[in-house]
Amino acid sequence: MKTIKYITLVFVIFYAFAGNAQTKKIKKGEKSYDVYSYEECINKFEGVTNKSVELKRKLAESYLKTGDYFNAEKYYDEIAHSDKSNSEDIYNYASILKINQKYDEADTWMNKFFQLEKGDSRAKMFVQNKGIINDLLNDREQFKIKNIDINMSAQDFGTSFYGKNQIVFASTRPSAKLFKRIWNWNELPFLDLYIADIQRSQLKNVKQFKKKFNKKYHEGPSSFDKTGNFMAFTLNNYENKSKDGVVKLQIYTSEKEGKKWQKPVSLNFNNSEYSVGHPALTDDGKTMYFASDMPGGFGGTDIYVSTRNADGTWNKPLNLGKPVNTEGNEMFPFIHKNGILFFASDGHPGLGGLDIFMTKKSESEWLQPQNLGVPINSNFDDFAFIINDTMKSGFFSSNREDGKGNDDIYSFKLVKQLLFDIIIKGKVKDNYGNILANTNVSLLDQENNPVKIVNTDDKGIYEFKAHQNELYVVEAEKPKYQTDEKNIDTKGKSSVSQDLILEKLPDFIISGLIVDTDSKEKLSTVKIISINNKTAEKETITSSDYGQFLIKLPKNKLYDSIDYTFITEKEGYASKTVDFKQILSKFGEFNTEIQMNKISIGGDLGKIIEINPIYFDFNKYNIRPDAALELDKIVKIMNAYPTMEIELSSHTDCRGSSIYNMHLSDRRAKASADYIKKRISKPTRINGQGYGETQPVNDCACEGGRGKGLNCTEKQHQQNRRTEFKIIRK
């Protein structure tokens, strides 16, 4: 009994010591996390068993900050699948999946995020931009990028133009400082400002910028006005920490008098309770864009703008608002002299991590930011984009895998003009003004290839992103409605508004398709004369770009019979007459296909325009009424084609003598030609020749002497008595 109690006491003491050890690890890990010592935080937290969701969140973020995306995904996965996850956990998991290029899985979790946070701009943009990854991964061959030679295993990033041909950037590269301080986050030295010469696509002659600006802790990135005599730069506020002990960023400015930079001045809106950093000055130095997490923003860090007064003070910062800022992080702005704003964001749809975007003001509003795509952006962090005055070359920073260090500087050449995507949007309604939700709307290029397809929302609204200076077609389709399409010209426009009206179709429709007989190509702009043989109503319509035409039957009822004749006409094609009879045995469409023949030299006109051979009574050469109908078709097409020349060939049956039949066929050919000559311009365009009985269609028993043809039926004799037509000139 004493032994059992002793063993039990040992276990109690063991678990007490173990629990106490776990508590100490957690406390040390949290302290390391609070001072950005993420490697130490990971070491402590990984030793904790039965990790809480909150501890896993800090572990996941620590792995993310140190670039261990595999383990970051592992913990975000566990958090997202737990019953204690929140919407931001879901978003973070989707984000790390994108960094690890698991885009399909990322979309699945972004769908879940949308269901939880439908009002979040990141969720809305995801739904509006589904499938954007493929577009972003499609290299438009606008940029040629290069990892520059000066990069080291240190951090090198945050370039800014200085003067005509120099660059100032931030780096953790070794310096000549007597005391080297190490930054907890990545265990590299603190950032200093460096200067280098621009030589083509490389940076050369690197040296420290000015000792006045490189102090104990982080300095940089920086920005300069066009003269190079006024600068703004980011500085760690170590002397005045926030209430919770966190070091915030501040922006300082300095002015150059002669060759000497003056003492840096803290901006009047710097605050120990929030960060302001990543300044970007306009050419005149009077306006500054920057990033901040100050209260009143949309998310983590937002882009703000402030203007400088004559006394050197700065006006109250103005948040750029939406669509620039999101609930995520927007940072590293750069403003070009042409008004284009470049910045980095993890809140807008992208490839993973921070992506680089561009926007500009249209009147008083910023355009929807546009992702620059590959190769500027990758699934890692891409940021600090700058481009020269001529918009031909520049630099950006990235921690992508092919780099030399933690962050590297890349140069680029812009080989194709940067154009903004524009928004094409509108409403789809019926012909009575009713909104049509869930309607299929397609954006087509100039060759009628689909670019993107969307469905209208519950307000009937559709929206596309398209390229500037291109021609498009928007087309709306919905069952039981007639399709509507409109041409869109985006030249010189930042947005296009185009409503589409779909006419409600009746219960019964004749849906026709007109094609080339040989190639089966769909024929557009075909003139169609539609004749309702029951009411004698006539209508002229034109086939669409897809060879289609519709005949609406609003007055008909189920089981009615319809009787139509369609006459089709198109330049270069023979006219065609088609009868269409149908019992309306069901609701919906009744389809017909009309094949048209091209007019070709040497072709049999009787086949090309589908006239019937002309027949004559026995021993007669007068034009019968049925023959006149066929000859009228030839008259019509010869008048439509004033250079066309036709040859008639007239034939008899084999009864009678060969000489008599030859004379009879000549008279028939002359009679047919004379009928046509009286009705066309330039009568010499038609001539005829008789062949007698020499070219029968049916031989039957026509060969021999007396009594020839006795074995032919009257129908066979009739088929031999004919006049045919051939085109000899078009």
Image (cartoon, rainbow, N blue to C red):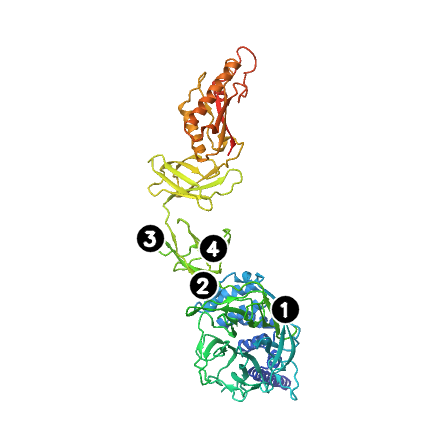
Q: Mark 4 vs mark 2: which is more N-terminal?
A: 4
| Residues at marks 3 and 2, CA–CA distance in whole angstroms | 30 Å
Residue located beneath label 1 in the image: 146
Residue 596 image label: none
Relative to residue 541, is residue 183 depicted above or below? below
Q: Mark 3 and 2 residues: CB-CB less than 8 Å, in contact?
A: no
Q: Mark 3 vs mark 2: which is more N-terminal?
A: 3
Q: Amino acid at mark 3?
A: Tyr
Residue located beneath label 4 in the image: 472
| Residues at marks 4 and 1, CA–CA distance in whole angstroms | 35 Å
Q: Position of residue 648 (x, y in %)?
A: 49, 26
Q: Nearer the viewer, residue 703 or 571?
A: 571
Instruction: Say what secondary structure mark 4 lies in.
Output: strand
Q: Amino acid at mark 1?
A: Lys
Instruction: Say what secondary structure mark 3 lies in.
Output: loop
Q: Amino acid at mark 4?
A: Tyr
- Specify whether 191 is left or right of 548: right
Is residue 106 in view?
Answer: yes
Residue located beneath label 3 in the image: 432
Instruction: Say what secondary structure mark 1 lies in.
Output: strand
Q: Mark 4 vs mark 3: which is more N-terminal?
A: 3
| Residues at marks 1 and 2, CA–CA distance in whole angstroms | 32 Å
- Specify whether 9 is left or right of 521: right
Residue located beneath label 2 in the image: 494
For mark 1, does the 10 Å Cα neighbourhood hold few (<14), some (14 to 19), or many (20 or more) residues? Answer: some
The answer to which image quadrant residue 165 occupies is bottom right
The answer to which image quadrant residue 236 occupies is bottom right
Q: Amino acid at mark 2?
A: Ser
For mark 4, does the 10 Å Cα neighbourhood hold few (<14), some (14 to 19), or many (20 or more) residues? Answer: many
- Specify whether 512 is left or right of 385: left
